[in-house]
Image: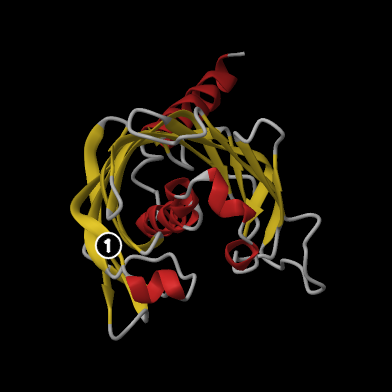
């Protein structure tokens, strides 16, 4: 029996060493990819919260929506459903599936009212969103609107079912001209758990700006702004990655990701 003890002991030590060093073996590029993916997935539809229920009865507006969804307004005039599984146009949507619902607390949609975006099997570019996002109107005029966003139920899943859990605390300021959204500026923080099971905190260091050029082209990517993504490590100091948004001209945007280890990644759009 004694001859088996050293072997068992070595296996035990090896398994402990793997557990201790698993964070050291993480490829930081995956964390950079995740940060970019989360940002892009969250940005592609939240602009809808700036619009009143009445706007969705305007076919000029609904016909311009990406993915060509069938739009239904509930009898209570407080619910709008965008159905991408039953598209209005022949081509349909190639990058969106499921339903996205907007629930309004009041038909007046005034200061202190709220809009909740709820996902029912909704997918964008094979990324699934589960839960909801809540937007509180804290300021509204003919020329501007400010929303405070929160969520404690949001789960994002990629095409491989890897998931990111997020708790949002964001502020979105919209500029409005002739009842049309012309610019969005976003700031705030996000906390949660990343693909690898580690805790994360993302801070928008410089407001993310989506301009008129991008909104008119239905490209919901920021042309400026900076984010830091800090990822905790087990038994090691956390690492921080930085995302910088920029554009060359118009809405020709790019995201530059500087990993904690110094590697630079560039993503477009």
Label tally = 1
- Residue 90: horizontal and vertical position, in percent? 82, 73
Residue at left 31%, top 69%? 211
> Observer-nearest residue: 250 or 199?
250
Relative placement, left or right, of 74 versus 177 is right
> Dot 1 corresponds to which residue?
209
Display colour scheme:
secondary structure
| Crowdedness near tag 1: few (<14), some (14–19) or many (≥20) residues, C-alpha within 10 Å | many
Residue 102, by quadrant, is: top right
Residue at left 36%, top 41%? 23
Relative placement, left or right, of 197 versus 204 is right
- Residue 253: horizontal and vertical position, in percent? 35, 76
Residue 118, by quadrant, is: top right
Residue 212, by quadrant, is: bottom left
> Observer-nearest residue: 47 or 19?
47
Residue with the most extreme bottom position? 249
> Observer-nearest residue: 221 or 212?
212
- Residue 64: horizontal and vertical position, in percent? 60, 69
Residue at left 79%, top 54%? 85
Residue 176 visible in the snapshot: yes
Relative placement, left or right, of 81 versus 104 is right
Relative placement, left or right, of 42 versus 123 is left
Query: For the N terminus, which image quadrant?
Result: top right
Query: For the C terminus, which image quadrant?
Result: bottom left
Residue with the most extreme top position? 1
Element type at marker 1? strand
> Observer-nearest residue: 177 or 20?
177
Residue 260 visible in the snapshot: no
Q: Is residue 261 above or below residue 269?
A: above
């Amino acid at each position: 029996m004694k001859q088996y003890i050293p072997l068992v002991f070595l296996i035990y030590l090896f398994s402990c060493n793997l557990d201790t060093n698993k964070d050291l073996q993480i490829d930081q590029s995956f964390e950079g990819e995740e940060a970019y993916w989360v940002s892009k997935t969250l940005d592609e539809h939240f602009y809808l919260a700036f619009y009143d229920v009445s706007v969705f009865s305007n076919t000029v507006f609904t016909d311009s929506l990406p993915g060509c969804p069938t739009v239904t307004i509930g009898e209570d005039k407080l619910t709008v459903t965008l159905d991408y599984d039953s598209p209005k146009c022949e081509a349909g949507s190639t990058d969106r599936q499921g339903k996205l619902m907007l629930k309004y607390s009041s038909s007046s949609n005034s200061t202190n009212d709220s809009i909740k975006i709820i996902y029912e099997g909704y997918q964008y570019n094979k990324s699934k969103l589960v839960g909801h996002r809540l937007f509180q109107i804290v300021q509204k005029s003919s020329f501007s609107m400010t929303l405070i966003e929160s969520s404690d139920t949001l789960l994002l899943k990629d095409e491989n079912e890897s998931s990111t859990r997020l708790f949002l605390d964001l502020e979105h300021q919209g500029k409005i001209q002739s009842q049309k959204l012309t610019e969005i500026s976003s700031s705030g923080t996000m906390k949660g758990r990343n693909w690898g099971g580690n805790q994360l905190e993302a801070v928008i260091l410089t407001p993310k700006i989506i301009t008129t050029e991008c909104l008119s082209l239905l490209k919901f990517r920021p042309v400026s702004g900076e984010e830091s993504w800090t990822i905790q490590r087990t038994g090691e100091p956390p690492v921080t990655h930085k995302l910088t948004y920029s554009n060359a001209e118009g809405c020709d945007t790019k995201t530059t990701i500087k990993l904690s280890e110094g590697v630079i990644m560039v993503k477009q759009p």
